[in-house]
Amino acid sequence: MVTHAERARVGEAAVSAGSSIYEGDRLSTDAGGILRVSSPALTLQLNEESMLIVRPPAGPEGGVVAELASGTLIFSAARTRNIVVVADDALIRPSPNASTIAHIRVVTRKELRIYAQRGALEFSYHGENEVIAEGAAYRVLLDPSEKEAAVTWESEQAGENPTNHHHKFLFSTIGIAAGAGIPVLMHELESPDKPGPPHKSKNH
């Protein structure tokens, strides 16, 4: 169910809080828009100028498959919730049995930004895998050219942006702000089974 919507659409129709979301729906936001969808133990937030398609489960274990076509997705999942995010053919999912808050941004068809705000993430792309530790933020370059790999290696040798090398992709460490895109309203996206500290009243 949609819990918050500003300048957001399902398909071509404007959407508002209270609307239901179904498999196959295309969710999108315009400039300055935001869309938040919640179900038991899972919250998805699309930031501005983003598009996501809700796909049927890929296997018998069920769960949610969210295909991020553009923009930024932030998701909060309880340890009991199964979700796979597809972005530029890469698969990103929470580590098993862990509550998770993660930011995933599609920069181009070859570049992602991923921030594991809470809990670790499992990343896979064309048969190669990497684990993103809790608190880590990465620039992910897919199918890097020899020139791109050389530039990244030179940066690493200079002590900048430590890198994890794979044949199919490169991980370069970035600042959290670059990984997250924009700040998150933590009280809106806390994992249901691992709430954050109580929020102080504005009067104190």
Image: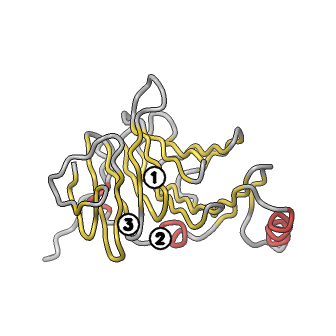
Q: Are marks 3 and 2 in contact (CB under 8 Å)?
A: yes
Q: Which mark is residue 181?
A: 2
Three-letter code for the amino acid on which mark 2 is drawn: Gly
Establish if 188 lies above or below 99: below
| CA distance separating discs 1 and 2 | 16 Å
* Disc 3 target residue: 47
Q: Judge depth for marks 1 and 2 and give the one in front.
A: 2
Q: Are marks 1 and 2 in contact (CB under 8 Å)?
A: no
Nearer the observer, 97 or 122: 122
Answer few, some or many: residues within 10 Å of disc 1's Cα (few below 14, many 20 plus, some between 14 and 19): many
Query: Looking at the picture, how far across and down is residue 156, in whole percent?
Result: 80, 68
Q: Which comes before the other along the chain, label 3 or label 2?
A: 3
Q: Which comes before the other along the chain, label 1 or label 2?
A: 1
Label 3 SS: loop
* Disc 1 target residue: 118
| CA distance separating discs 1 and 3 | 19 Å
Establish if 172 lies above or below 100: below
What residue occupies the far top of the structure in this picture? 60
- The residue located at (36%, 52%) in the rendering is 26
Query: Looking at the picture, how far across and down is residue 194, in whole percent?
Result: 33, 45
Q: Are marks 1 and 3 in contact (CB under 8 Å)?
A: no
- The residue located at (37%, 36%) in the rendering is 81
Q: Which comes before the other along the chain, label 1 or label 3?
A: 3
Nearer the observer, 76 or 107: 107
Label 2 SS: loop
